[in-house]
Amino acid sequence: MAYFSKAKEGDKVYGLVFGKGKILEVYPDSHYSIMVEFDNGYQVPYTEEGVPGWGRFKKQTLFYRNDVDLSNADFSPVEKILSPRKIIKLREKKQLQVRLPSGLWVNVKKADPDYVEGLLENEKYHLFRKKP
């Protein structure tokens, strides 16, 4: 049985990318079975397994809020703002992390490439750090 097979409109959820949200609509006979609206205004479709309809995600990124334990998640602030040159160097060495809109730090390879490129183009270097 899929994780969101008994989802109802209004259920509170937590997405690893966008943070807190709630189920807006349920589509029982569709590939994307639920539509989630997050606190920051984004609306994203998800499969019954919790896989989003955007990016290159192959694993579940959405959970019921009561099922999530964020005690081991890293939400710490950035200590040093990296230069564009350092960001490129760390990216090549696979030691670069990016901060997702939820506040969670992840490896830049796991983040959506369009999101990362948008941050770089807009010079939001404070959202990158060296892997601790």
Image (cartoon, grey):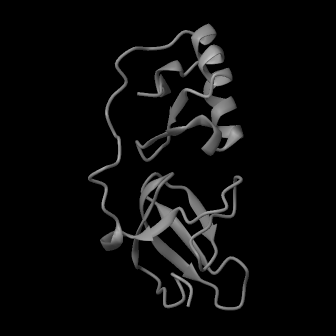
Residue under the point 63% across and 22% down: 93
**Foreground of the two, 71 or 116:** 71
Q: Residue 20, relative to residue 79: is it above or below? A: below
- Residue 70 showing in the rendered view: yes
Give percent across and percent down for residue 28: 64, 91
- Residue 121 showing in the rendered view: no
Q: Which of the 4 image quarters holds residue 116?
A: top right
> How many numbered callouts?
0
Q: Residue 4, relative to residue 73: is it above or below? A: below
Give percent across and percent down for residue 32: 68, 76
Q: Residue 117, relative to residue 24: is it above or below? A: above
State the residue lying farthest toward the left: 71
User: As drawn, is 113 to the left or to the right of 87?
Assistant: right
User: As drawn, is 98 to the left or to the right of 80?
Assistant: right
**Foreground of the two, 18 or 89:** 89
Q: Which of the 4 image quarters holds residue 57?
A: bottom right
Question: In which quadrant will I find the C terminus?
Answer: top left
User: As drawn, is 17 to the left or to the right of 68?
Assistant: right
Residue under the point 48% across and 75% down: 23
Residue under the point 34% across and 40% down: 75
Give percent across and percent down for residue 1: 56, 91
Residue under the point 61% across and 45% down: 110
